[in-house]
Image (spheres, rainbow, N blue to C red):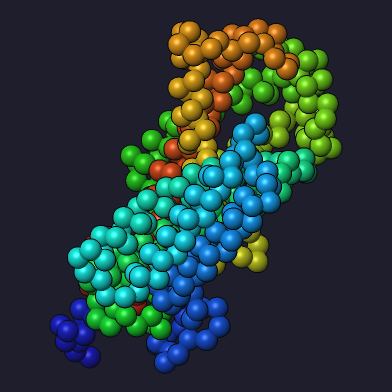
Amino acid sequence: MIVSTAELEVTVVVSRKSQLDTGAGQPSEDMGWTGWSRRWPVWIPYAAAVWGLLFAAIQVTWAATGTTVPWSPDVAYAPAVLFLLAALAVVAAGACLATGRPLAGRGRVTVAASLILTVPVFVMGMAGLPAYFVTLASFSGVESATGLVHTLLSAVGAALLILVAVSGRRRQLGRCPRCGHTHAEAGDFRGPLAHPGPSSASKRTRRTVYLLLCGILPWAGVKTVWTLGGDAIGVTAEGWREANAGASGVAKALESVGIDVTVLAAAAAVFLLLGLLHPWGQVFPRWTLLLSGRRVPRLLPLFPAWSCAVGLSVYGVVLLVYAPLSAAGVLPRMEASGAFTTGSGVTWMVAFGGLAFGGLGFGLLAAARSYAARTRPVCARAATPAAATP
């Protein structure tokens, strides 16, 4: 049998295509969750607008009723700040609705400026997610329900606004809003997606992430010494147990075998990070039993990675800046408190915490960036995609 050159080229292109979400062929109309999720560039601006109005209504209600909404354990949002956040949410909602329309000149600049202004605000609003995760996972309870709601709403809003900005940017560049590539029928989202095969992050990315993870060692090591009954940096094992006498039953059970609950949470983050770097984070491995061999949904590791990375990075940078300035006397020196018997011990622990949280946060950012690029799907009809612009 003679195979023409054209047929051979088609075969090569098809063989290099990744696994499709659906079976062979393109259905004329998608139904259910799969079809709905494929059309996300169509409905995401409206979802973001609904979020903006809901968020604004909640902030105005809290401000008008004098409800306490904590920004940190010791600081709460002032009513004026809540009103400002409500106004920014309304601005963001309007900008999201405008992205679905043809814009030029001032309109395009206004929409872009609105998203550039509001996205960082709501990204910072979700910075407390790691702390809430640890308290919930250890059954320690929630210190503030309004704080948790505010943080979750900010996280949802940040995700929606980023997706709106990404799809809008792609439209402006004449690319497919869904996959970011240039192909025919870029506005038709009914077709299936082609996903890249499993791959590892580059050596440069892996080395960078592993180096950042080394920052966890001093912090985790000191806490492990305390839970195992040892003394370190001005804290005795007895003082550590007394300071944590009010911890939950789960936390106490872990401490009885030498495991600090926050160290365990950091280990879970490291596990997530390793999945982002290696192929088993893209296809469920054998030990997942029923899920073995199935493709891992992209957002399953990406959303918790991005969510936790923001708060950890910001918190780590703040601690790393504060500790040396305090030790040098530029800022007020830290004094002994709680289980600590010396101010220098507190300073060292703050520095260790900065290395741990900052290293883990920036490591998650680097790994998640690599994972997002390696797993970005392509519309199946895009035979020769150009480079995508996020």
Q: Which residue does the image show at 51% across and 17% down from the upper left?
A: 323
Task: Give the image location of residue 43, x and y in percent.
Answer: 45, 75
Q: Does the image show residue 272?
A: no
Q: How many marks?
A: 0
From the viewer's perspective, tell me whether residue 11 is left or right of residue 315.
Answer: left
Task: Give the image location of residue 64, x and y in percent.
Answer: 64, 52
Query: Quick check: 59 above or below 312?
Result: below
| Residue nearest the viewer, comparing 297 with 156 | 156
Which quadrant of the rendered structure holds the N terminus? Answer: bottom left
From the viewer's perspective, tell me whether residue 295 is left or right of residue 370.
Answer: right
Which of the 4 image quadrants contains residue 8?
A: bottom left
Q: Does the image show residue 3?
A: yes
Query: Quick check: 295 above or below 335?
Result: below
Task: Give the image location of residue 293, x and y in percent.
Answer: 54, 65
Which of the 4 image quadrants contains residue 93?
A: bottom left
| Residue nearest the viewer, comparing 86 with 37 | 86
From the viewer's perspective, tell me whether residue 312 is left or right of residue 67.
Answer: left
Q: Which residue lies furthest to the left in this view?
A: 5
| Residue nearest the viewer, comparing 75 with 216 | 75
From the viewer's perspective, tell me whether residue 173 is left or right of residue 243.
Answer: left
Q: Which residue does the image show at 62% across and 22% down from the upper left?
A: 221
Q: Which residue does the image show at 59% across and 8% down from the upper left?
A: 344
Task: Give the image location of residue 62, x and y in percent.
Answer: 65, 52
Which quadrant of the rendered structure holds the C terminus? Answer: bottom left
Q: Which residue does the image show at 68% across and 43% down from the upper left?
A: 68
Query: Quick check: 100 above or below 115?
Result: below
